[in-house]
Image: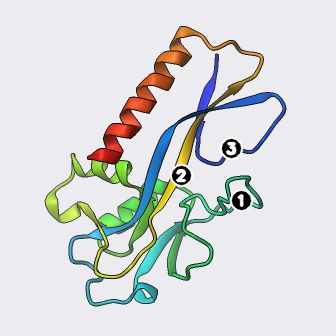
Amino acid sequence: MIVGITYAPIPHPDLEFIKVGFIEYCAFATKNNFKEKKLLEIPFAVPITVFPESPTGVKTLDNWPSEIDRKIAFQFELLETALDVARFGKAAVFCPSFIISMQNESLLSERQLHQIKHVSTPKVKRQVYIVKRKSDPMNSKTKSLTNFLKKSLIRRLIV
């Protein structure tokens, strides 16, 4: 059985979406970077890909609310590239908090990313789903993955 993980479920008659928890998105930059800047002055590294429509309202891969303006300095296909630009102090990123906490575990302190708090930035919480074919029965491996993600996402949100 093949499964995927998504926060932007696009309905399809052959697919089933199983809720496993929530992830929170925040704005991050290196410590004290952009501290003197207003929100519209902070350069962001953002994904190129946009969703034409989604039942959950997701428009961009990074989930930045479309009604809030920001300065887009860089556009990338990969989150890792955007994170790298942010780690070197060139931009901020808007991404899931758990990704930052996992990344920071293996980075030198000057490369670690911290939540931007000196200005008001959006916080977005999104439902996360496992997606599988409807025709595939829920087996023990899929149940294990579902339970692991439920526990893991809860633990990461609390930390």
Residue beneath disc 3: 9
**Quadrant containing the N terminus in the rendered view:** top right
Q: Position of residue 142 (x, y in %)?
A: 55, 18
Count of marks, rendered view:
3
Q: Amino acid at mark 3?
A: Pro
* Residue displayed at 27% across by 90% down: 36
Q: Which mark is on residue 126?
A: 2
* Residue displayed at 22% across by 62% down: 111
Q: Earlier in the sequence, mark 3 or mark 2?
A: 3
Q: Amino acid at mark 2?
A: Arg
Q: Is residue 38 visible?
A: yes
Question: Is residue 118 shown above or below 130?
Answer: below
Category of crowding for the residue at label 3, using alpha-carbon neighbours closer than 10 angstroms: few (below 14), some (14–19), many (at least 20): many
Q: Earlier in the sequence, mark 1 or mark 2?
A: 1
**Residue 9 falls in image quadrant:** top right
Q: Position of residue 30 (x, y in %)?
A: 26, 69
**Residue 50 falls in image quadrant:** bottom right
* Residue displayed at 24% across by 52% down: 104
Question: Residue 89 or 144: which is nearer the viewer?
Answer: 144
Q: Nearer the viewer, mark 3 or mark 1?
A: 3
Q: Amino acid at mark 1?
A: Phe
Q: Are marks 1 and 2 in contact (CB under 8 Å)?
A: no
Q: Which mark is on residue 82?
A: none
Q: Nearer the viewer, mark 1 or mark 2?
A: 2
Question: Residue 22 or 139: which is nearer the viewer?
Answer: 22
* Residue displayed at 34% across by 82% down: 119
Helix, strand or loop at mark 3: loop
Q: Earlier in the sequence, mark 3 or mark 1?
A: 3
Residue beneath disc 1: 51
